[in-house]
Image (spheres, grey):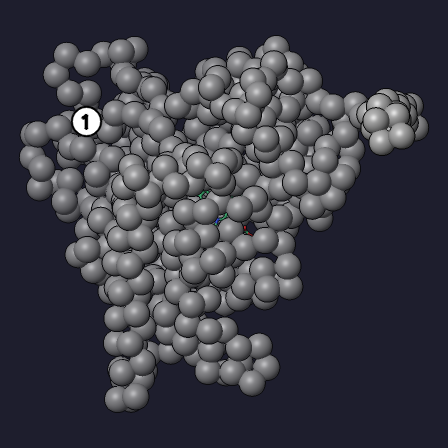
């Protein structure tokens, strides 16, 4: 009897499993509507498309978009990644469905640097982010506040001109000059004075944030970061930066207690004041305050430096454009010793040059990644909740259906259009757009326009020995913010005549 029963039980269970399998298969294929996924290249099990990604992801996505179209999907490990490469796709994500795409994916290193995403840039979309963003927009980066730091920009750009003058006939490393300028300005605006070690902190911070982290896509492989030393590198940067900020904040509090308060003169003061005034209603703790300061440094230094680097490189490569811009600047400043921010208003060619540089070299070519918070549909394709999203401002800026001769550096194209970069024109979004758009646009543009105008007012430029305009290296560096691969350098001579002869 027992033998008879056991000989029945195996086929019985097999039959039940087979029926369940058939039912599930039918349910999955028939009753569920089929998904229309964006086109994607073949992927491998486990790693997805990671083996194909190159050191320049914006170029990799650019070549994929030529083959698969303006909305495509790749997989980083098991994480689906949507890449948007057209103005329509960008508009859909950053405007029509902005709320759905208003969160950020988890980036372990960045989160660690900013005390567990207690900042603005990496915080998930939430009431907390809204509060922090409004502090940032209303108290730190409003137009009025940016204006109030005009003296810092004017003093520090003049100091840069002096440093360049001192270099005599040797080639000037302008990448290093722009790095010092942006660091010094941010240091004074954010902390109240310049600190020697600050530049090194920022360099280390941006380096670890920009390093691809295996643990983000394969949490089960995160242990590798312990062995290869990456974790301890990150820990050291975080520790050093934290000690530094704790000290700066303590010094400010001490000064306050001693009655040496100087309200509103830098971001630390402003945030401490906000902390005091709101301690009963919407308190911000010290960690949030430090995270916000960190955002300002990391968001504001590297990006503004990169924009200046690429702009000067394009001007050196295009001497006619350089002369034309010098002419405009020197005409407007003809009777003056020094250019001030008031003069910038009328420098229309300068503004066009900046735009053209941002079109061809958006400092963050893929913007800061976002994530879909719910299942949705973008331009006819299904996109699942949790999908990461990159918007390729780099590819959109080169779209031949939007830009005539897109690879040409031709600032005058901006005289024929009202397109600008403030997040309303989706064919041109170097600062992103919508809820997550960059709040530092005014800050960056004021500084970079002034720096460039002063530079071209005071100097004429020559390429270092033997380098011809057409041979000038224009390759990209690596990282989230894409610098020029090779620093931009030139020999300068003091401009003798205020006006440049007609080219
Ligand atoms: C040329 C200079 C700059 C460029 C190209 C740039 C670009 C960007 C981009 C592309 C984003 C992401 C936008 C999005 O997701 O839609 C962003 C976000 C951000 N930027 Fe900038 N930025 C620049 C300067 C600055 C400056 C000077 C500051 C502050 C001092 C700043 C602070 C921030 C912050 C806090 C965010 C995060 C916003 C959020 O997630 O809500 N940026 N920036």
Residue at 39% across / 23% down in the picture?
A: 55
Occupied quadrant, residue 487: top left
**Residue drawn at the location 33% of the way across and 19% of the way down:** 474
Q: Indicate left or right for 20 with 162 as reference.
A: right
Q: Nearer the viewer, residue 407 or 122?
A: 122
Q: How many residues crowd mark 1 within 10 Å: few (<14), some (14–19), many (20+)?
A: many
Which type of secondary structure does the marked residue at label 1 adopt?
strand
Q: Quadrant of residue 105?
A: top right
User: As rendered, which of 220 and 120 lies closer to the eye?
Assistant: 220
Circle 1 residue = 490
| Picture coordinates of residue 283, whole percent (x, y) | 53, 77
Whether residue 444 is visible to the viewer of this picture, yes or no, is no
Residue name at image x 59 percent, y 33 percent = 79
Classify 262 as above or below 377.
Answer: below
Q: In the displayed structure, does residue 290 sit left or right of residue 46?
A: left
In the picture, the quarter occupied by the C terminus is: top left
Could you tell whether 224 is left or right of 143 in the image?
left
**The quarter of the displayed image where residue 224 is located:** top left
């Amino acid at each position: 009897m027992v033998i008879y029963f056991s000989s029945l039980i195996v086929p019985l269970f097999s039959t039940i499993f087979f029926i369940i399998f058939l039912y599930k298969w039918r349910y999955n294929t028939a009753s569920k509507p089929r998904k229309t996924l964006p086109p994607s290249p073949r992927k491998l099990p486990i790693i997805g498309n990671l083996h194909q990604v190159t050191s320049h992801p914006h170029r990799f996505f650019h070549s994929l978009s030529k083959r698969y179209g303006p909305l495509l999907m790749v997989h980083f490990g098991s994480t689906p990644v949507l890449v948007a490469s057209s103005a329509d796709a960008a508009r859909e994500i950053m405007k029509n469905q902005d709320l759905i795409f208003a969160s950020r994916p988890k980036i372990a290193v960045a989160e660690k640097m900013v005390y567990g995403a207690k900042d603005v840039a990496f915080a998930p979309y939430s009431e907390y982010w809204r509060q922090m963003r409004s502090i940032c927009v209303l108290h730190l980066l409003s137009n009025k506040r940016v204006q109030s730091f005009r003296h810092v920009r004017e003093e520090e750009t003049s100091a840069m001109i002096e440093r360049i003058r001192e270099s005599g006939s040797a080639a000037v490393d302008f990448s290093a000059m722009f790095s010092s300028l942006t660091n010094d300005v941010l240091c004074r605006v954010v902390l109240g004075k310049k600190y020697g070690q600050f530049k090194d902190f920022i360099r280390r911070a941006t380096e670890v944030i920009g390093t691809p982290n295996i643990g983000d896509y394969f949490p089960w492989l995160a242990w590798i970061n312990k062995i290869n030393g990456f974790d301890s590198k990150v820990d050291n940067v975080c520790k050093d930066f934290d000690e530094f900020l704790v000290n700066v904040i303590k010094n400010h509090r001490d000064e306050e207690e001693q009655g040496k308060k100087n309200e509103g003169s830098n971001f630390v003061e402003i945030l401490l004041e906000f902390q005091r005034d709101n301690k009963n209603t919407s308190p911000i703790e010290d960690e949030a305050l430090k995270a916000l300061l960190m955002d300002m440094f990391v968001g504001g230094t590297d990006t503004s430096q990169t924009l200046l680097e690429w702009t000067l490189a394009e001007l050196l490569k295009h001497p006619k454009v350089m002369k034309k811009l010098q002419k405009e600047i020197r005409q407007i400043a003809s009777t003056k010793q020094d250019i001030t921010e008031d003069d910038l208003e009328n420098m229309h060619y300068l503004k066009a040059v900046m735009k053209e540089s941002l079109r061809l070299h958006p400092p963050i070519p893929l913007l800061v990644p976002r994530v879909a918070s719910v299942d949705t549909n973008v331009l006819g394709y299904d996109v699942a909740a949790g999908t990461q999203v990159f918007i390729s401002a780099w590819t959109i800026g080169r779209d031949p259906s939007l830009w005539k001769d897109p690879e040409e550096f031709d600032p005058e194209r901006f005289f024929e259009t009202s397109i600008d970069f403030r997040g309303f024109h989706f064919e041109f979004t170097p600062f992103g757009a919508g809820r997550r758009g960059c709040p530092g646009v005014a800050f960056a543009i004021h500084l970079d326009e002034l720096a460039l105008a002063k530079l071209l007012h005071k100097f004429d430029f020559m390429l270092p020995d033997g380098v011809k305009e057409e041979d000038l290296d224009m390759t990209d560096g690596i990282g989230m913010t894409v610098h020029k691969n090779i620093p931009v350098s030139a020999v300068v001579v003091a401009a003798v005549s205020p006006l440049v002869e007609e080219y």
